[in-house]
Amino acid sequence: MSRKIGSFSSYASWLAIGGLSIGVTALMLTASIIQGFQDVVSDKLSNFEGLGRVSHILGNPINMLDTTIISIIENENLDINPYIRGVCILRFQNKAEGILIEGVEKLPEIITKSGNFDIYPGQIIIGNGLASTMDIDLNDIIYLQGFSNKKSSYNIPLVQSFEVISIFESGLQEYDNTLAYVSLDDSRSILNYSKNTVSGLINISGYLSNLSYPYYYETWQERHALLFEWISIQKWPAYLMFGLIVLVGLVNLIAAIAMIIIEKSNQIGILLAQGITKPILKYVFMLQGGIIGLSGGVIGGFLSIIIILLQIKFEILKIPSDIYFMDKIPFSFNYLVFLFTLIFSFAIAVIASWIPINRISNFNPSRALRYE
């Protein structure tokens, strides 16, 4: 009979470990997905926008010969890329679409990864969403028309032809569907910018601050503050919901410790009769609860690591890129979060164990040993 009792209490302990493992796995995966989503979006946005951009406070063109601008460009600690941005019409065959063009000297890293390091006059790079909408392929010739008052000698708006040398895909629909890159000189011609003027400066690397009027500096985080505020709002409800699974595991832990105390009442009575103190017994059961919590945390952590590695290598879990900015579920395993989860699992398990252990304070050895 005692063997059955022992096996049942052991079974209850394993159930508690299993419940905590599932809860910790869910919590770790949730934290990894949220962090991975934020990292992927941050990486893509910082690639397109740079660390930040210098602009005129009124949106006017910036004179490159201005002393403030010259001092920024000549700063050895900064990597500066002048740009010109504006709206124009893209025409291809019988289709026309309003797009945003950006003339640059250096292409963003997200585009240079595909092997395109330079862009020359007469060349254009467009997003895959725009290419799909307009049925544009590589090496096609397209036409751009600006909205300036600049016209040809026949009083017809000027139109320039471009060869599509690359089609990029970022997963960010804001860029893939509307943005195109041309050379700085071509953008100056299409958008009717005078010589030595640009829309602003892109800070690719380095720390820039203390700009004087009429210029201001806007980081990519500030530019997309609404998106990251939305991510932050979504983060805590997700933690709360999956944290409730951990709470269910803790309830199983309390039940398991209570069962062990009830089933081992004879042994507890013998130990108390032999002189062991109740505080020491409480310490033993609290340690057992802590071991169950730590075991659940370790198993749950390793399960989450295995799932994360499988997703990173085989990309099993797919998502629609037109909604989530990417075509697969991103994971970013944070070792500090994992360590914190292990410590938290151990600590909360020890605290939860205190609830059933209080029974020992009122434990009567004579009653437990009445039939021994």
Image (cartoon, rainbow, N blue to C red):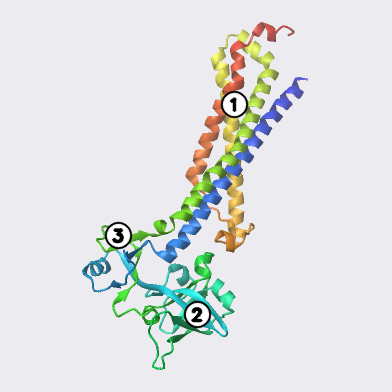
User: Regarding mark 2 in the picture, which secondary structure is present there?
Assistant: strand
* Left or right of residue 288, residue 120 in this image: left
Percent across and percent down for residue 266 are: 69, 13
Q: Nearer the viewer, residue 336 or 330?
A: 330
- Note whether 146 is above or below 254 in the view shown: below
Residue 48's label in the rendered image is none
Pointer 3: what residue? 208
Q: CA distance from mark 1 to mark 3?
A: 55 Å
User: Regarding mark 3 in the picture, which secondary structure is present there?
Assistant: loop
Mark 2 or mark 3: name the one nearer the start of the chain.
2
Quadrant of the snapshot with the C terminus: top right
Pointer 1: what residue? 288
**Which amino acid lies under the numbered mark 2 shown in the image of this protein?**
Leu
Residue 90's label in the rendered image is 2
Percent across and percent down for residue 313 are: 59, 58
* Residue at image point 50% right, 58% down: 40
Q: CA distance from mark 1 to mark 2?
A: 70 Å
- In the picture as drawn, the residue positioned furthest to the left comes out as 67
Percent across and percent down for residue 360 are: 61, 15
- In the picture as drawn, the residue positioned furthest to the right comes out as 1
- Note whether 154 is above or below 211 in the view shown: below
Disc 3 crowd rating (10 Å Cα; few below 14, some 14-19, many 20+) is some
Q: CA distance from mark 2 to mark 3?
A: 35 Å
Mark 1 or mark 3: name the one nearer the start of the chain.
3
- Note whether 355 is above or below 119 in the view shown: above
**Which amino acid lies under the numbered mark 1 shown in the image of this protein?**
Gln
Mark 1 or 3: in front is 3
